[in-house]
Structure formats: C-alpha cells, structure tokens
Image (cartoon, rainbow, N blue to C red):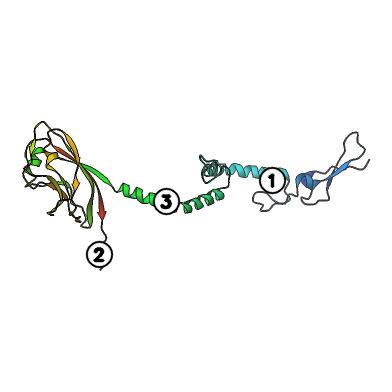
C-alpha cells in the first residue's frame, strides 16, 4: 500500500495546492486524492478586516466570532433601521427587493404624481388657514347697534393683514318675544367703512321663533387691510327677541409690501 502521511492542517501553507488528502474506502481497491484547497479553500481573503491570509480556519472563525459579538448592538440597531423589507400594500415597492430598488421606484412614482401632490399640498395649506369663530350679540347690544358698534373680529396686528370673510351664519335664539327692526338690519362692515360686507334682513331678525340664516354678501363691498370687522344697524332695533350667535368662517391674508 502506498505510504500515507497525515499532516497537521494548521501547519500547511494556505495557498499551496500541491497538498492532497488520500482517502481510502474499505472494500475498494483504489484510493482517491482530494486537493486540500478543494476542502478548505485557499485561505486567502479580499480585505483581511478580521482574518489574515494563511491563518488557520479555527483562528479565523474565532476572530469573526469575537468581531460579531463586539458589534452585536450595532448589527441589531441596523436591523431595526432597515426593517424586514416587507410592505403592507406594495403599490410601488415589492417585498424583499433591495432598498435602492425601493427608493428608485418611489422616486419615479413621486415624479409621475408631483402635479397631484402639489395640488393636494396647496389644498391642505389653504384649509389650515381657514378659521371659524363664534360671536354672541346680546339683546342689549342689538338695541344699541345703531350707535355702538360691536367688534366681531379684532383689528389685525399688521396693516398688511386683511380679513377675507368666507361665510357668516347666525342663530337667532328667540326667547318668546319679538324685535321691531324699524327697517333695520344687522350688518357687518370693515371698521370705519360705510358700505356693509354682509347683512341679515328684517324678516330673520323679527322672526317669532328660533331660526338660522346665512348672511348675504353685498356685491359692492370691498376688502380693507388692517381693519377690524364690526356689526352695526342702520336703524334702531327695539324689543328683546333673544341673543344672536354669529358663526364666522374667515381667512387672514397677508399682503406683500409694495415694491418701490
């Protein structure tokens, strides 16, 4: 039988492919030689970050085991940041694809839909600028409105700010008696202006039961920056028909400075 030599694997040169392991199988006449490099590889590494060329396999595995343990928290945190790469709806991305592929798909989808996204953003911005307030005018204040105006929106802090009234509705909380309008109406003005913006007519004010109405915008009214909104009546309203609650929907627009 051929001379068989058993070498300690750790002493062999890592990338010397002339070493073979001779394998005999009982009952067979022939033996087989297997190159050592076929079993363990060349033990030559691209970067040698934690292992070294020619290092025995046990030492290499031990070095990697220590490196993984030392970086266990970082590895876990990175896993949390990256996630499982599974998605609920998969509208533009797919489960298991690389993050670069997902980002690329979303980048293209945003570009295709940027017009619609812009419209939605403008709509949401416009909606968040809309405000609603409630103001109550008591019977005594209603009786005095022809001489003492009632401020319903305070003077803006900037002379370049202007109230844009969107809608004003009123709830006449009738108390069992009636008002006499004498031709008067409840009207809203920009302070110091003579043309009303909105008015509630005599029929609504003189109603004999509780009722609600939307104020009527007047065609010849104008917007005035830096002014409060006040309620007045052109004629004295007498009697005590109950309080009126106003529901005012508005925006406060800021005008640009005039360029010189």
Of residues 29 and 207, the one nearer the viewer is 207
Taking the image as shown, residue 185 lies to the left or right of residue 28, namely: left
Q: Position of residue 190 (x, y in %)?
A: 16, 52
SS assignment at label 1: helix
Q: Earlier in the sequence, mark 2 or mark 1?
A: 1
Dot 1 corresponds to which residue? 60
Dot 2 corresponds to which residue? 258
Q: Position of residue 93 (x, y in %)?
A: 53, 45
Quadrant assignment, res 150: top left
Q: CA distance from mark 2 to mark 1?
A: 75 Å
Q: Quadrant of the C terminus?
A: bottom left
Of residues 233 and 24, the one nearer the viewer is 233
What residue is rendered at 42% in x and 51% in y? 116
Callout 1: 10 Å neighbours few (<14), some, many (20+)? some
Callout 2: 10 Å neighbours few (<14), some, many (20+)? few
Dot 3 corresponds to which residue? 116
Q: Tell me if I can see residue 29 in this picture.
A: yes
What residue is rendered at 66% in x and 45% in y? 63
Q: Quadrant of the N terminus?
A: top right
Q: CA distance from mark 1 to mark 3?
A: 56 Å
Q: Earlier in the sequence, mark 3 or mark 2?
A: 3
């Amino acid at each position: 039988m051929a001379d068989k030599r058993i070498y300690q694997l750790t002493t062999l040169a890592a990338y010397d492919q002339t070493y073979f392991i001779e394998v005999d199988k009982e009952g067979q006449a022939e033996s087989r030689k297997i190159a050592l490099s076929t079993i363990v590889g060349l033990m030559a590494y691209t970067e040698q970050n934690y292992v070294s060329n020619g290092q025995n396999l046990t030492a290499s595995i031990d070095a990697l085991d220590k490196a993984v343990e030392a970086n266990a928290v970082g590895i876990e945190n990175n896993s949390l940041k990256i996630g499982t790469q599974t998605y609920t709806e998969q509208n533009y991305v797919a489960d298991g694809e690389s993050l670069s592929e997902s980002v690329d798909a979303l980048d293209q989808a945003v570009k295709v839909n940027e017009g619609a996204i812009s419209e939605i953003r403008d709509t949401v911005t416009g909606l968040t600028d809309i405000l609603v307030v409630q103001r109550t005018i008591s019977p005594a204040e209603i009786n005095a409105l022809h001489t003492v105006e009632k401020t319903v929106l305070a003077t803006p802090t900037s002379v370049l700010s202007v109230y844009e009234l969107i809608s004003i509705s009123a709830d006449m909380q009738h108390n069992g008696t009636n008002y006499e309008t004498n031709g008067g109406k409840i009207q809203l003005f920009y302070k110091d202006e003579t043309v009303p913006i909105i008015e509630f007519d005599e029929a609504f004010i003189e109603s004999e039961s509780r009722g609600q109405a939307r104020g009527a915008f007047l065609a010849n009214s104008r917007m005035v920056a830096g002014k409060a909104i006040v309620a007045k009546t052109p004629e004295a309203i007498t009697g005590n028909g109950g309080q009126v609650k106003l529901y005012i929907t508005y925006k406060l627009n800021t005008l640009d400075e005039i360029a010189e």
